[in-house]
Image (spheres, rainbow, N blue to C red):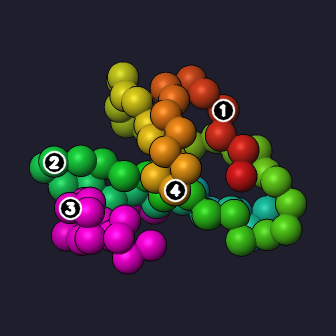
Amino acid sequence: MISLHNSNSALQDGDIKFLYSNDKTEVFAFERSDNNEKIISVFNTGRDKQNFDIKVDIKNFTWKELLSGEVGNLFMEIIL
């Protein structure tokens, strides 16, 4: 995790915006962004897999799951 933090400028110095929080499902998400990149971090602190929607203010983008390296597009469903 320290390596991810140190290799992404948005995680070091970026602005933070909370995107999603649900106490019942124990899922939360936030965005960190700077002039170079935007990173959305999603955490499931519960025991069960959860489905949820996050609205993002981006028309076209590709996402990369930083721990596994998996890459997808805006319309791919993420299950944690």
Q: Residue at x 49, y 34 (%)?
A: 71
Residue 50: x and y in percent read 79, 51
Residue 15 position in % (x across, y down): 25, 64
**Mark 2 or mark 1, earlier in chain:** 2
Q: Is residue 54 left or right of residue 24?
A: left
Q: Secondary structure at mark 1?
A: loop
Pointer 2 or 4: first along the chain: 2
Q: Find the magenta span and give its range.
A: 1-19
- The disc labelled 3 sits on which kind of residue? Ser
Instruction: Answer whether labels 1 and 4 touch (C-beta < 8 Å).
Output: no
Which residue is more in the foreground, 31 or 73?
73
Q: Find disc 1 in the rendering and name its residue.
A: 77
The residue at which mark 3 appears reads as 9
Three-letter amino acid code at disc 1? Glu
Q: Nearer the viewer, mark 2 or mark 4?
A: 4
Q: Which residue is mark 2?
A: 36
